[in-house]
Image (cartoon, grey):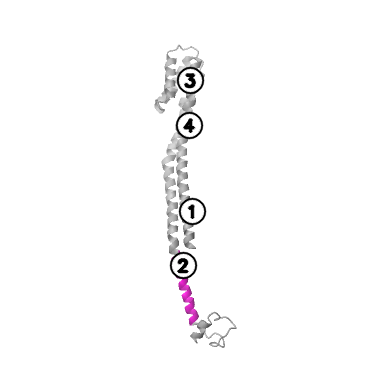
């Protein structure tokens, strides 16, 4: 086999019906050593390029997995830390409605000072145990209760006291709702921030991975 000539006609080697001066009757062997060497060189080049590409892409992939794992852990931490307080806030609001608001509303709608005093006392007692006693609404209700205690049982409820109690109810209810909602907003906000930051990082990693792979 004339290796020199095979190098010159390697493009045509192995093609049926193509003969050259080195192989006038077709190919002598199933494979030519020159052609084999060329294939080995090409395979080695491909392997080197593949290794380089794999190394360049391995770090972004690892970073992506770390980001996903970190985001999952942070979301789990948010759920673990903030769901119980949010659930307690719901229960506290239900407790407020059943053990405070309902009695203050009855006091505001009572026809006589005797009935109003009993109902208002139950609501004020709850506020003392569960609400800020420094709030204006609490102090106002306490003053109304003190006033009612000094009145005879069957005295008609003064309109000013009724209006004052009704106003305090609305303000206290608004504050209780804000307290309840704030816990859930804190939970959702924490999860949203984790997901948003993780998504941005993943997008940047994907861009970097595409850039390195091109």
Labelled disc at residue 164: 3
Q: Give the range drawn in magenta.
A: 33-53
Q: Nearer the viewer, residue 52 or 151?
A: 52
Mark 2, residue position: 50
185 to 12, vertically: above or below: above
User: Was residue 63 drawn as part of the magenta stretch in this picture?
Assistant: no
User: Was residue 48 drawn as part of the magenta stretch in this picture?
Assistant: yes
Give how far apart the Cα atoms at labels 2 and 4 are.
Answer: 61 Å
Callout 2 crowding tier (Cα within 10 Å): few <14, some 14–19, many ≥20: few
Nearer to us of marks 2 and 4 is: 2
- Residue 80, percent across and down? 42, 43
Observer able to see residue 50: yes
* For the residues bearing labels 2 and 4, Cβ distance under 8 angstroms: no
Of the image marks 2 and 4, the number of the one nearer the N terminus: 2
81 to 205, vertically: above or below: above
Labelled disc at residue 148: none
Give how far apart the Cα atoms at labels 3 and 1 are.
Answer: 57 Å
Mark 4, residue position: 177
Determine whether the residue tagged by mark 1 lies in a helix, strand or loop.
helix
Of the image marks 1 and 4, the number of the one nearer the N terminus: 4
Callout 1 crowding tier (Cα within 10 Å): few <14, some 14–19, many ≥20: few
Callout 4 crowding tier (Cα within 10 Å): few <14, some 14–19, many ≥20: some
Give how far apart the Cα atoms at labels 1 and 2 are.
Answer: 24 Å
Give how far apart the Cα atoms at labels 3 and 2 are.
Answer: 80 Å
Mark 1, residue position: 203
Nearer to us of marks 4 and 3 is: 3
- Residue 57, percent across and down? 45, 61
Q: Which of 47 and 100 is in front in this view?
A: 47
Q: Which residue is drawn at 51% across and 85% down?
A: 5
Give how far apart the Cα atoms at labels 1 and 4 are.
Answer: 38 Å
* For the residues bearing labels 3 and 2, Cβ distance under 8 angstroms: no
- Residue 8, percent across and down? 52, 83
């Amino acid at each position: 086999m004339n290796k020199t000539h095979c190098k010159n006609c390697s493009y045509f080697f192995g093609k049926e019906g193509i003969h050259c001066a080195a192989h006038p009757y077709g190919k002598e062997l199933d494979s030519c050593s020159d052609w084999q060497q060329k294939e080995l060189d090409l395979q080695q080049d491909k392997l080197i390029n593949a290794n380089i590409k794999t190394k360049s892409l391995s770090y972004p992939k690892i970073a992506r997995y770390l980001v996903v794992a970190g985001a999952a852990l942070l979301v789990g931490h948010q759920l673990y830390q903030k769901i119980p307080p949010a659930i307690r806030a719901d229960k506290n609001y239900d407790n407020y409605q059943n053990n405070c608001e309902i009695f203050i509303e009855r006091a505001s709608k009572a026809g006589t000072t005797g009935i109003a005093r009993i109902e208002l006392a139950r609501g004020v007692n709850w506020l003392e145990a569960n609400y800020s006693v420094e709030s204006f609404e609490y102090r106002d209700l306490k003053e109304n209760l003190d006033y009612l205690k000094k009145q005879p049982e069957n005295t008609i409820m003064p309109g000013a006291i009724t209006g004052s109690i009704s106003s305090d109810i609305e303000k206290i209810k608004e504050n209780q709702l804000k307290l309840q909602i704030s816990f859930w907003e804190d939970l959702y906000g924490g999860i949203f921030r984790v997901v948003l930051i993780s998504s941005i990082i993943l997008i940047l990693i994907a861009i970097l991975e595409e850039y390195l792979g091109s």
